Image (cartoon, rainbow, N blue to C red):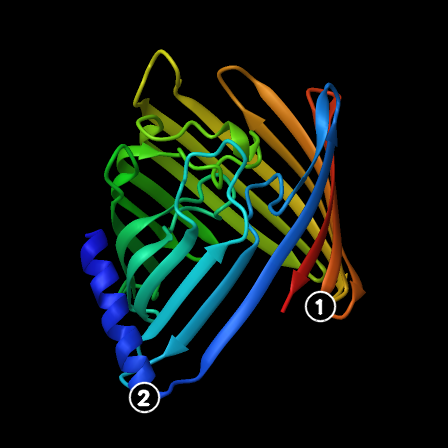
Amino acid sequence: MKWLVSGMLLAMAGAAIAQAPDVVIKLDARLNYRTAPESPNTQRLYDELGNYSIVSLGFKLEPGFKVYVGQKLQRFSGGHDDDLLDEYYVEDEGIWRVGKQYVPFGANRLVRESVLAARGDTNLLIEGIPVRFAYCQGGGGKQEGFVGRVGGRIGFSAFIGDHFGIDGTSFGLIRRPESASGRGRGYGQAYGVDMSKGNGPLMFTFEGVAFRQPSKDELDHAFEAYDLSCTYTPSKYQTYILGWTRKTNPNDDIIRLQASIFATRNVFIEPMLRYRDGKTYDLNIAIRVRL
């Protein structure tokens, strides 16, 4: 599948040169400083929730297809995804997408996996409810199987296959990106529900996921994770978040305080303070540049 996708991208790129399309280059970079008790201070080009710094290129072809390639500026220290490309895919936007991509599951807070996949988007005939589904084929101990989400503000998600949850981009609310389990591990099934409700400048979100069928029982255990957060956005220059995350087996509670504050053109300061089981877990301060 990887060779097929690579061939498609090369063909699209060749056609793009011939057609001279509009090319859009974007940068979403984070310089994150972290300090935590009993661990060394670190400076990384990714944040503690598993978000990479990305430089991306996108363009549209004459038939209306879109090509996107996003590259990481730094991989997770000690991480297990050795691919420098975060995503690369071809799509008919809102209908299908083929390539390495973040697959649709929940609110992308607990499960956020970039893997080679073929994805389809549609709506149910009844009430026009959105349906997003994908078949993943990572290979080599990476994610394989089916994943999808049904719903709008209230959604239900599931994956059935193997090795989901292995990347540092997943479980960012309950573990550090460097602690990702990696190839050959993960879970065979997960079932989740997520919902969101807005009220003026406030947005309330909830997500709960049950993880089942661990690939290696001696290392991984079935568990549930829940996240409840309140986001306050008084203006386009400020955002504040209060969140609570619980993990079971064993029980673990994490409280986080986040903010995104405008500093100057295209630059935001994003601090985050977290408490784990009543004790300070870490303090992060990120400078985020979006161009």
Percent x, y for residue 266?
71, 68
**Which circle, 2 or 1, is nearer the viewer?**
2
- On screen, residue 227 versus residue 64, left or right, reads right
Residue at the (19%, 52%) spot, across then down: 1
Percent x, y for residue 221?
40, 18
Q: Compared to 65, does 239 lie above or below?
A: above
Q: What residue type is labelled 1?
A: Asn
Q: Which residue lies furthest to the right in this view?
A: 263
- CA neighbours of label 2 inside 10 A, class few (<14), some (14 to 19), many (20+): few
Q: Compared to 60, does 124 lie above or below?
A: above
Residue at the (60%, 46%) spot, across then down: 46
Specify the quadrant of the image occupied by residue 123. Answer: bottom left
- On screen, residue 131 versus residue 34, left or right, reads left
Residue highlighted by disc 1: 266
Q: Is mark 2 on a helix, strand or loop?
A: helix
Percent x, y for residue 150?
35, 52
Which quadrant: the C terminus? Answer: bottom right
Which is nearer the eye, 274 or 125? 274
Which is nearer the eye, 221 or 288? 288
Percent x, y for residue 59?
40, 77
Residue at the (57%, 31%) spot, across then down: 176
C-alpha separation, residue under disc 2 versus residue under disc 1: 31 Å
Reading the chain from its start, which is encountered first: label 2 or label 1?
2
Q: Which amino acid does label 2 sit on?
A: Gln
Residue highlighted by disc 2: 19
Residue at the (27%, 32%) spot, across then down: 141
Specify the quadrant of the image occupied by residue 64. Answer: bottom left
